[in-house]
Amino acid sequence: MVDDRRQFDLQRLRDLGLDLDSSQDEAELKSICRLTQDCIESGDNSLTLNQRTERFHCTNCGQSGSFRDLVRALESGDLAHEAQAPAVLDAEFSEAPIRATHAVVRAEPKVMHLGEGQRVRSDKEMRLEEKQARKAAREGRHTGERIIITLLALVFLGAGLAAAALSGFANYQAFSQSVADPLQSGVWGWTGVIAAIISFGGFTFFYWHTANHRMKEGVRALLFALAGGGTSIVGTQMYIAANNQAAEAELVRAGSNRDVLQTQIADWRRQLEGIPPETRSVEGLEAYIEEVERVGRTHQKPYRDAQNELGLARRRDDLLVRIETANAELLGTGTGDILVEAQTRTSIPGWFFALMLELFSSQGTSIGLVALLILYGRSRVNVGEEGVNQGIS
């Protein structure tokens, strides 16, 4: 009931000309004060409305009171003029609630000279038209801001979800490799994914509960989000550490194999030197042998010499391929590029990368979702309040 009364009073203040939708703070709304002519002419947002205490205060004219007092003062239509009983006004807004505002001399009703076929509009119709005009001007003024913030919120949301996906992948790999059993490996791996989801969703729930003054639920959501975030950081750091250890082990293995490769290359080169340099190519010898077999001269000595030479040519080609592959491994340009990678790898601490990934995941999604809640949640509330006010009127 208290929230309904407060929302009703805020909507009445909007109807009476206060622009409360441009405030960035949900707890304290600011607007131009309409209690005195000086406040109106200054154009400053000197009027502050505290939604928790349901009281207002103007830093320009110094008047304060409850929301209901402000509604009554603005409804009287006499407080926007300094010439109308300033002493009474100051006394009523200083400490005690406003009780005698209706006793101030009321403004004379406006007399409109209408032509033939026109009718006199009621005060309700005039207030409704004025309200609609203010609403249209306010919506036009905030359309550009809403589009820009919506696009940025979607960008933050997309980046946060992408970071959450990376964090979930790292957690799955780290936790699944912590156990040997295949079934348990999958279970613990998906536990890491759940932790990543909790980390980026919990902070949005924290904002939502605290913005609606549910502090206990907000604290519980915060603890839940911090637990998920901490688990996600540990999982990502474990994944990075495991990869770094595997790379270091591969580097050690490649270093120990260097001497073996060099010895093998030297042996292959000695074998290659034993093959006569005038040995023809494999393709040429195979073509020659095929032609001799076709004409039926396989019993002659040149045919047997060609077969022996073909074996030497094939051995030469095999030794050349082995030497080339071994040299590529030594230089780090073959299939195992571990030597080159070890020289060009950037050393980034695993904990720093894990922490930054978790911040991108949790805070990116939270900032995006909270911005969308503020932009589009308020408009829905205002529409509902207008429907309630129209039903009451």
Image (cartoon, grey):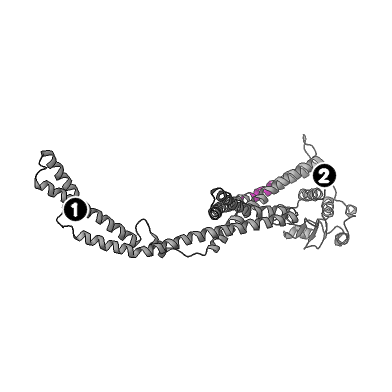
Secondary structure under tag 2 reads loop
Magenta region, residue range: 136-144
**Given the current orientation, which residue lies at the most extreme top position?**
117
Q: Which residue is mark 2?
A: 111
Secondary structure under tag 1 reads helix
Neighbourhood count class around disc 1 (C-alpha, 10 Å): few under 14, some 14–19, many 20 upward? many
Give left or right: position of 287 versus 197: left
Identity, as a three-letter code, of the amino acid under mark 1: Leu
Front one among 139 and 181 = 181
Q: Give the percent coordinates (x, y) of residue 306.
A: 14, 48
Relative height, residue 81 to residue 139 (above, below) = below
Q: Residue at x 32, y 62 (%)?
A: 261
Front one among 261 and 393 = 261
Q: Give the percent coordinates (x, y) of residue 46.
A: 75, 60
Badge nearest the viewer, 1 or 2: 1
Q: Residue 312 has which mark?
A: 1
Q: Residue at x 73, y 54 (%)?
A: 217
Does the rendering let one see residue 137? no
Identity, as a three-letter code, of the amino acid under mark 2: Val
